[in-house]
Image (cartoon, grey):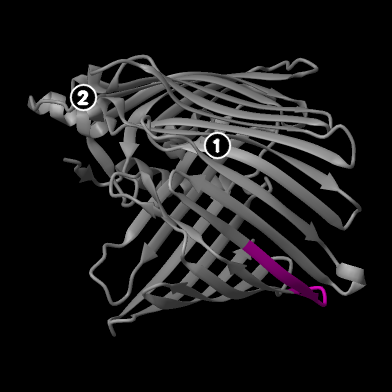
Amino acid sequence: MKRSRPSFIGLFGMTALLVAVSANAQQKAWGRFSLLAQSARSQHDNGLISTFSEVASTLTLRSGSGDEGGFEYAIDVRSASYPGTQRDRIFSLYDAYVGYRGKSGGLGFRAGQMWLNELGGLGSLGGMLVEYRQKHPWATGRLRFGLFAGLEPQHFKAGYVEGIQKAGTYLAFDGNRGWRNVLGLVTVRHENVTERQVVTMLNFIPVGKKFFLYQAAEYDLQGPGGQGHGGLTYLFANVRYAPGKVLEFQGTYHHGRSIDARTITNDVITGRPVDPRMVEGLLLDSAGGRITVSISRWVRVWGGVYSDRTNLEDKPATRINAGFSTTNIFGTGFDLTASDFRTERTGNTYDSWYVSLGKTLGRAVYLSADYTSSLSILRLTDSGGVTVESRPSTKRYSLSSTINLSRAISVLLTGERLAELTGHEDRGMLGLSFRF
């Protein structure tokens, strides 16, 4: 069972931030505050009516970046509350740290709560990072080497998971035009048991304007909690090649094993037997490709084929996609996009249509009307994972507008209806974003 203690490290980072802000005033810092309020009303054919409301907010503050070095800081806080319900408030603290970097490279550190992007999904940390940046970079880029250690933050509330320690290292190469390669090692300890020991890999490789590769992977050196076996746990790759201005080829591959390492390790610590099926986990495999043809500056068409499998014993499902988009139709300011995904599973075939019509009004307002013939709902689980719920018979109708009041302030308004076989749901959303 997970327990938490107060987020002392995060609070230290937020307190020390006040010192760093004044020391860092000469650098160009930036921030953003966003607020989203939504309310929904569901009515079923049997007369049952339910309501739902949510208020979510985000606050981001970051110091300036560059080779001049000096003090640095960051805060990234996100929260959500649900008026009129007993549902717990969500509070996520991604960044709350202060640090220092040497001028033009050298040794630097960060202390507090942080998300290490170099490690992908394993990057959450409450503790200390020490990093060395190559002082005299090559013409092609710069090396970085990092060591980190600390605790594992809770996902949806302030605090840290009791009994969990995290430590590791990474080696990164930052090249020109966004090129990046990272090799990392992360060890997660649960009391006296190694919960996971993972090699992480991240590659972002652009070659001119024609070729682009993004790849992320996790390879477990052992099974969860020492049970079972290690192996490739996660791999995502996205490749794009554009030989000219007309054609673009894109291929994607996604492989994953969904394993609840935390629960398995808890069972090992308490002496409970571990179900072998939990050690193997659920399998996700998806592979496919798409070809896009730009007929003109304003018209594009595309088509693709994908193969998906969500369990080892299941037969792959086939998804066929085709669509087009056109902007500023005949100079009217209207944009139109339409596409269809046909999913073919054993004994079940359905289409997912998407149509969007948008219009620019002046220089500050954009309106759009959208229709979708089926939905996939992403839901967060208590353990921090996600589940995907397919609704092939749910239709969505929506109207939305984006209003740019200034270069710093924008407003989002959305109204939508979800029409299902057993009823419907009406939802309204209001969003505000302010950058400073």
Say if the magenta span includes residue 363: yes
Q: Which is nearer the eye, 172 or 375?
A: 375
Residue 225 percent location from the top left of the image:
24, 22
Q: Quadrant of residue 41?
A: bottom left
From the viewer's perspective, tell me whether residue 176 is left or right of residue 373.
Answer: right
Say if the magenta span includes residue 367: no
From the viewer's perspective, tell me whether residue 238 is left or right of residue 50.
Answer: right
State the residue at coordinates (56%, 57%): 351
In three-dimensional space, the C-alpha distance between marks 1 and 2, rounded to whole angstroms, equals 27 Å
Vertical comparison of 386 with 362: above or below: above
Q: Which is nearer the eye, 230 or 275?
A: 275
Residue under label 2, please give it: 276
Residue under label 1, please give it: 307
Residue 203 percent location from the top left of the image:
62, 25
Comparing labels 1 and 2, the label whose residue is closer to the camera: 1
State the residue at coordinates (28%, 49%): 382
Three-letter amino acid code of the residue under disc 2: Pro
Q: Residues within 10 Å of mark 1 (few under 14, many from 20)?
A: some
Q: Which is nearer the eye, 253 or 224?
A: 253
Vertical comparison of 10 with 428: above or below: above
State the residue at coordinates (40%, 49%): 93
Boundaries of the magenta span: 354-365
Label 1 SS: strand
Q: Quadrant of residue 190?
A: top left
From the viewer's perspective, tell me whether residue 431 is left or right of residue 45.
Answer: right
Q: Main secondary structure of the magenta part?
A: strand
- Residue positioned most to the bottom: 47
